[in-house]
Image (cartoon, grey):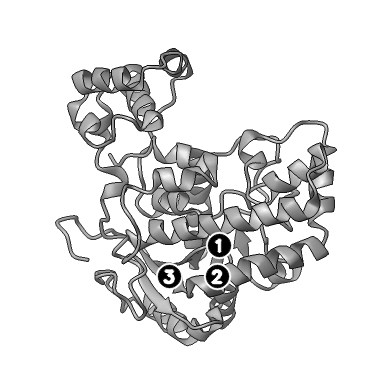
Amino acid sequence: MRSGHAAPVGPRHLAIVGPTASGKSALALAVARRRPELEIVSVDSMQVYRGMDIGTAKPSAAERAEVRHHLLDVVDPWQEFAVAEYQRAFRAALADIEARGRRALLVGGTGLYLRAVIDDLAIPGQYPDVRARLEADPDTAGLHRRLTELDPVAAGRMEPTNRRRVVRALEVTIGSGRPFSSYGPGLDAHPPSRFLQVGVDLPRDVVAERIERRYGEQLAAGFVEEVRALTALARPLSRTAAQALGYRELLGHVRRGVPLDDAVELAVRRTRRFARRQRAWFGRDPRIRWLGVAADPLEALDAADRLAGAVLAGTDDGTDDGTGDGTDAGTDAGTGDGTDDVAESQEETSAAAARLARP
């Protein structure tokens, strides 16, 4: 999509995105096998945690030996790791890849992390003392009125009842001494990027079935035992790690005796809901080229490989209009900026979304 923004400078890279269980990782690996210049970079807020392997569907040791992967097993599961930390780690990984004359193939479903790195979003600071004072005030409407006085532009961008966003905007405005809106349009802007985004567009019923089947495979591979091992660590899981889909529900089974079938059923239901919201998030980005497939994501391999070849050859100018080769997955995307949609399933990711803005 053409805009008034200047074209970004530097090598082009590729990103394969889509809902969880859509097969984007398998597609990325297949493309990288054909294109040895590519190295895979995980864009997953939970794959950064060591010891969380089965439930996050991390690539196997054999797959990592075959194709170089980045941003897996970055921190221990008791450590907090948010979008700002991911952004710093990504910049270092990308610099390393480019220094060796390679190109990055990003793959993952954490839409916020993807936007943070491909659009180089600025992340306002955190001010815990200010936030604590604001959280102690139960009058959300009153807080919104206060925001209207201090930053009417930011106040006009959010519902007065959206407490999380109101508190965050006030926290930044008061803590930094500058209006929250002054950081820029944030997630509302879709400027030109060095990253060509390709979306895997599977039918919803296929994704729903793949989610249930994957949980079955993960349980057979020892998912419950993995969760038990995490609870036996000397330090408790970080808030972020404990919120990971699948882990959150199995922790209820391991710690509180929730029947396994009930825990898995809840995980499947929540993950299916999260997949719909991921689809909505990515559907709002007109730059994504969607590749529609009927059942198997590898049906899109040739099309994805051609796009990878164009990126590597420098023949793709990055000015596509987002319609791509497949369907427009944004037609049923819903409304809003996506932050609240993600919140119900991946708490840390959505909370971070509220503090993103572009400089």
User: Along the horizontal axis of the image, is 243 left or right of 88?
Assistant: right
**Residue 199, label in figure:** 3
User: Along the horizontal axis of the image, is 293 left or right of 259?
Assistant: left
Please tell me whether mark 1 or mark 2 is closer to you in this view: 2
Position of the N terminus, as image quadrant, is: bottom left
Instruction: Indicate whether 119 appears above or below 33.
Output: above
Mark closest to the chain's N terminus, 2 or 3: 3
Residue density around tag 1, few if under 14, some if 14–19, many if 20 or more, within 10 Å:
many
Instruction: Indicate whether 191 appears above or below 288.
Output: above
Disc 2 residue type? Val
Please tell me whether mark 3 or mark 1 is closer to you in this view: 1
Instruction: Indicate whether 189 appears above or below 286.
Output: above
Closer-to-camera residue (228/355): 228
Q: Are marks 2 and 3 in contact (CB under 8 Å)?
A: no
Closer-to-camera residue (69/259): 259
Residue density around tag 3, few if under 14, some if 14–19, many if 20 or more, within 10 Å:
many
| Secondary structure found at label 3 | strand
Name the quadrant containing residue 230: top right
- Residue to which mark 1 is pinned: 20
Q: Are marks 1 and 2 in contact (CB under 8 Å)?
A: yes
What residue is shown at x 28% (from left), y 23% (from top)?
144
Q: Position of residue 162 (x, y in %)?
A: 36, 33
Closer-to-camera residue (34/100): 34
- Residue to which mark 2 is pinned: 207
Q: Position of residue 17 (x, y in %)?
A: 47, 65
Rounded to the nearest angstrom, the CA distance separating label 2 from label 3 is 14 Å
| Secondary structure found at label 1 | loop
What residue is shown at x 39% (from left), y 35% (from top)?
355
Rounded to the nearest angstrom, the CA distance separating label 3 from label 1 is 12 Å
Disc 3 residue type? Gly
What residue is shown at x 61% (from left), y 38% (from top)?
240
